[in-house]
Amino acid sequence: MTGRLTLLGSSGVLMMLLLTLIFLWVPTDIVLGISQRIFYFHVPMALVAFLAFVVVVVGSIGYLWKKSERMDALAYAAAEIGVLFTTLMLITGMLWAKPVWGVWWTWSPQLTTSLILWFIYTAYLMLRSYAPQGDQGARYGAVMGIIGFVDVPIVYMAAKWWRDVHPEAVVGPLADEGSLEGKMVIAFLVGLLAFTTLFAYLLMERYTLRRQESLVERLRYSHV
Amino acid sequence: MTEQTDNPLRAYSTRTPSWWAPILAILWKDVLLESRTREMVMPILVFSFLVIVVFNFVIDPKPALVTAVAPGVLWVAFTFAGMLGLNRTFSMEMEHGGIEGLMMCPVGRDLIYLGKMLGTFFFILVVELIMLPVFAAIFNLPLFEPGLWLITALATFGFATVGATFSAMAVNTRAREILLPILFFPIAVPVIIAATEATRAVLAGDSLGDYSRWLQLMAGFDVIFVVIAALTFDFVLGE
Amino acid sequence: MSKRLAALVATLILLTPAMLGSSHTEGEDYLPFLFAVFAVTWMAFFGYAFFMTRKQADLKREIDILRQSIEESEGT
């Protein structure tokens, strides 16, 4: 328990540090202006979302291999938090795209893949809630977790080639990410660390809750 | 997985001449069933015809517009048709305990998967091969290209690989009719993109070399997912 | 408590479009977008924590019911 509190505390401190860095310390990007500061939230969340889906596939394979309920609870918890982070990644991405490109959305390979990623893992969560509880649902989830993960690079490739055929419509000032200054890199790393610790904390909490849920579920059926 | 001689129930599989015999047996069972009940090909055929007709009204494809929208219309119709076929793949096994019969078959689960998957592939492909000339006539397009048949076959096989697995899952869930498309579409997105773009290239008169990467993408998808789905099907069916 | 929390979050969410609508996307006037990013992110994490707390409360209630019924069945 103290480990968790440490995790939550350090995540909170890192978030404060990140906000301080974003508002008071990092230089303003010459081309993108203030809006570039969204980057320190958006990109770390994107990376953490992807980390979450790696955890899902590890938990899925682990469940099928070892039949361990812990692995399944881990996969489920990671999928739920991954969807949360992907949702935030998409929303913050749109809020970044609007001032920079003048549009809320564009079908770039990254954006398309992120959206499909969101659909795949939302489908995973729906499958879990509609499938029978216990082993059967866990097996279905694990198979979906594996298939979904393998699908992601194929989606990215298809979206990339599709972009070649359908060149991007003219959008505002082209946001070439370009090189980051030293201070920007530091702020980005602080952001990455802050969101990773937050992810680890949420994952542990959700994992425990999920374990308790299935335990109570089983107790109810064995007792009634 | 197929050769478990220690189990007397599985002795049958050691006597069968080859691994493909059970696959063909399951495939033949589905073809026979279809020839008697006619619950799959005809309804899907009519449905995909309807989709194309409805599209004709909502987008009014004038000759100048036809080559731009036709690939999309064709693949929306085929994807929806495939969707309906996938719904039937395992829901027909739920009637009269068909699934229990399949699960008691003394053969590996991967072979059961391959049999069901090939059956789905076959039925959807039949519908599509009938629809292609109809489509060509309605939209006034030259669709008698061998390239198009190859695209259709590769894409439909891709649909069947992941679709058969999702169909087997969805029949055991609540809200199964709505859950299957939600599972299936995001995973099938690369195939839908590839098939549409390759069709566009064929209609534009491009040579095979210009769109071969889309064919490779679909072939890659087919191979990857037929292997993954066959290996994991044991977990989908359960005990 | 939870109702007040929900009302607060709902108000914030309703305010977001107003905040966005008032923005001019010229020059350095990008600040509303930056604020929207923080607002959305914090609300989401806040909401998720709230969701987990509610789940925990449901679970606790269920455990209490189970314990009660076990005690009753042992009593008879």
Image (tube, rainbow, N blue to C red):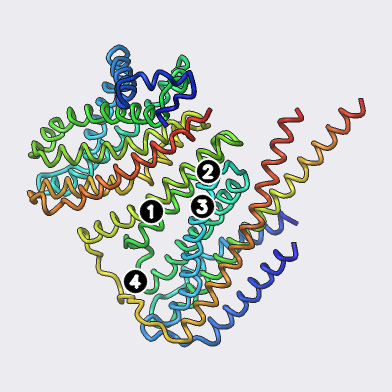
Amino acid, disc 4: Trp
Q: On screen, B13 above or below B213? A: above
Q: Secondary structure at mark 1?
A: helix
Please tell me how many numbered marks the rendered image carries.
Answer: 4
Q: Quadrant of residue C27?
A: bottom left
Of B205 and B19, which appears nearest the observer? B19
Residue bearing the label numbered 3? A58
Q: Residue B45, how many percent across, how many down? A: 25, 26
Of B17 and B75, which appears nearest the observer? B17
Residue bearing the label numbered 4? A101
Disc 2 packing (10 Å; few <14; some 14–19; many ≥20): few
Mark 3, mark 2: which one is toward the viewer? 2
Q: CA distance from mark 4 to mark 2?
A: 47 Å
Q: Are marks 1 and 4 in contact (CB under 8 Å)?
A: no
Residue located 49% across and 55% down the image: A53
Both marks 2 and 1 on one chain: yes
Of A70 and A90, which appears nearest the observer? A70
Residue located 37% across and 39% down the image: B162
Both marks 3 and 2 on one chain: yes
Q: CA distance from mark 3 to mark 2?
A: 10 Å
Residue bearing the label numbered 1? A152
Residue bearing the label numbered 2? A65
Q: Are marks 3 and 2 in contact (CB under 8 Å)?
A: no
Q: Quick one: label 1 or label 4, which is nearer the N terminus?
A: 4
Disc 4 packing (10 Å; few <14; some 14–19; many ≥20): some
Q: CA distance from mark 1 to mark 3?
A: 15 Å
